[in-house]
Amino acid sequence: MYVVGECRLRALLKERKLSQADLSRRTGYSRSQIGHWINDRKRVGVMGLDKARTIAEVLGLDSPYDLYHWETAPDKATDD
């Protein structure tokens, strides 16, 4: 199993030489919302798949899942 890790949006914007304002204009999402995804995931949560797909398309990513680092979840003992 996998769990969502850190949002990669900051690094992706830097690589593409785009600002949060640029992304806001291209997607229609507010700068403050974009900033929350970048800085405040624990409070705001992971962006919805519809938003991630829009952002991934704007950034030229193959998949919306590329917006996050993915971590392997620790194995949980199962009660069978």
Image (cartoon, rainbow, N blue to C red):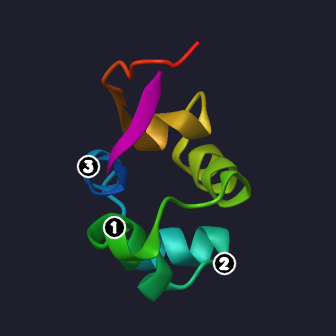
Does residue 45 show up magenta in the picture? no
Expressed as whole percent of the image width and height from the top left, the position of residue 65 reads 54, 35
Specify whether residue 19 is in view: no
Residue placed at 53% from the left, 76% from the top? 24
Residue 61, compared with residue 56, is above or below; it is above
Whether 18 is drawn above or below 32: the answer is above
In the rendered structure, the answer to whether residue 52 lies left or right of residue 37 reads: right
Q: Outermost residue, front direction?
A: 80
Q: Is the residue marked by circle 1 packed among few (<14), some (14-19), or many (20+) residues within 10 Å? A: few
Q: Earlier in the sequence, mark 1 or mark 2?
A: 2
Magenta stretch: dominant secondary structure: strand
Q: Which quarter of the figure has residue 48?
A: bottom right
In this rendering, the label closer to the viewer, 1 or 2 = 1
How far apart are the alpha carbons under marks 3 and 1?
18 Å
Q: Label 2 is placed on what type of residue?
A: Gly
Query: Which amino acid lies under the numbered mark 3 shown in the image of this protein?
Result: Ala
- Magenta-drawn segment: 1-6
Three-letter amino acid code of the residue under disc 1 = Lys
Measure how far apart labels 2 and 3 are at the Cα level: 20 Å
Q: Secondary structure at mark 2?
A: loop
* Residue receiving disc 3: 11
Which dot marks residue 28?
A: 2
Give the mark nearest the N terminus, 3 or 1.
3
Q: Which residue is mark 1?
A: 42
Asked whether 43 or 39 is in front, the reply is 43
